[in-house]
Image: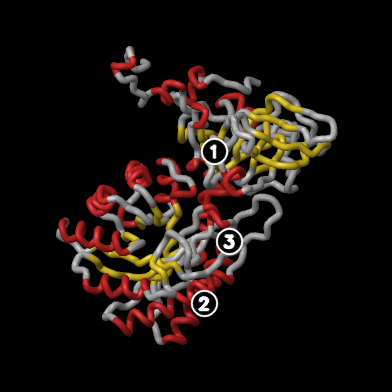
Amino acid sequence: MDSGRDPERAPAECTGEAAAPVPVVAGPPPVVLVRGAGGSLPPGCAVDTSGHLLAGGCDVPALAAQYGTPLYIFNEDVLRANCRAYRHAFAAYEPGGVVAYAGKACLTVAIAAVLADEGLYLDVVSAGELQTALAAAFPATRMVFHGNNKGEREIALALQSGIGRIVIDNFHELELVDRAARAHGMRQPVLLRVAPGIEAHTHDYIRTGSQDSKFGFDLQTGQALEAARRCAAAPGLDWVGLHAHIGSQILETAPLLALAELLLDLAVAIRGATDLRLQELNLGGGAGIRYREEQTLRPEDVVSAIITAVRDGCRARDLPLPRLAVEPGRSIIGQAGIAVYTVGSQKRVPGLLPWIAVDGGMGDNIRPALYQAEYTVAVANRMRDPAEETVHVVGRYCESGDFLARATRLPRLRPGDLLAFFSAGAYQYPMSSNYNRVPRPCLLLVSGGSADVMVERETYADLLARDRLPPRLGGRPPA
């Protein structure tokens, strides 16, 4: 297998031409078996009788041979099932519940189309995410626009698109949105983002609800209440509720329940200080998923706990029940994705763990280097082989911190073997880069034994397309 596939010679399927369906492997029912770190397969995966990993009914080694590696494979059926699990969990809540997918987790035109088809709302944080959703005909009225430093052009685009909600993050933005809405002759529905001072038990880089955070109006010093007062006096703003997000990869409901209590207290204070009444309560997202051995929360567990807390809290404070919203991203898309790499060189020094290099790394997955993320790893072309040694899996990038997995138990690897990293759907491709001028990978969407390209592999021509050579440097830009 070609582990260093030239992007200029990418298969036809990655350059815009129609991709032939990859057939379901024939023969006996798949055997669910995995060797390597973690010990089990994610939803939508199986192992066939030849020891090949299957995803969405597709043979993963066959996909790697056809489309090249690094390769990201997304299971449409898992994505849809997770959307429905959240929606169904709100069925018993009479004022209604909104599930707004956090687009920052991973958003493409194809993913946006699936989300729209499943009836979800969408949380966007930039004009780029907004435009991606619009390209998929996602209704702007079902979008929520976040961000701590929205630009005037982004705000104007959101208003022109008919955005459903804008989440106001700070006093500067409150003035910008008010002014822009008045210029458009409208009152824009908004929520206020609150920094509640709650510490989620997660990594510092993905903890967003503390007082010392760049996000939201501080609750403890009265900034959030003052923001509500200014909203009440702003003719361009239609205040409908409160929002907070306390972090990502949350594995317990206690922080979310504490968040609900604080926001309901704030709603009471706002009612006493203004004529505003809480209509919507958005408790953000952050539910964690299984990367290795974590005990995770099911969508129904998260939603049920929130509904109970809000019902009890509103009853105790004599508040009418608000419309509830959550913004899951990772827990919808994370386990739907698999990253596949080809093993290349190895460095073996007596007395040290072997270094196994693959053809991707921090350019397509910065998470291990950024906040020490861990994964379940398997050998996609030899799933039945027993684990024989502990190794470091590293990338091809010129950084000593370019790890994908540390001290991971795997079969003894050979050049050309395929490593599959499970739960790779969230915060990997969206955070990818062209570091070392390496093209970004191809993204596939699989379902029922068929695979379709949803993002083409970048070519070297793509890398050079926006480079310019000033005339004084003596040449023309590369063709």
Residue 466 percent across, percent down from the top left? 36, 26
Query: Can you identify the residue that label 2 sits on?
Result: 309
Q: Amino acid at mark 3?
A: Ile
Q: Quadrant of the N terminus?
A: top right
Residue that appears at 40% across and 87% down: 318
Residue 268 percent across, percent down from the top left? 38, 82
Q: Amino acid at mark 1?
A: Val
| Upstream in sequence: badge 1 or badge 3 | 3
Residue that appears at 41% across and 50% down: 117
Q: Quadrant of the C terminus?
A: top left
Marker disc for residue 191: none
Q: Residues within 10 Å of mark 1 (few under 14, many from 20)?
A: many
Mark 1 against mark 3, which lies toward the viewer?
Answer: 3
Position above or below: 46 against 227: above
Residue 241 percent across, percent down from the top left? 35, 70
Query: Can you identify the residue that label 3 sits on?
Result: 250
Quick check: 99 left or right of 398? left
Marks 3 and 2 close (CB-CB < 8 Å): no
Query: Can you identify the residue that label 1 sits on?
Result: 446
Inter-mark Cα distance, 1 to 3: 28 Å
Q: Residues within 10 Å of mark 3 (few under 14, many from 20)?
A: many
Label 1's element? Answer: strand
Position above or below: 213 against 473: below
| Upstream in sequence: badge 3 or badge 2 | 3
Residue that appears at 83% across and 36% down: 388
Inter-mark Cα distance, 3 to 2: 17 Å
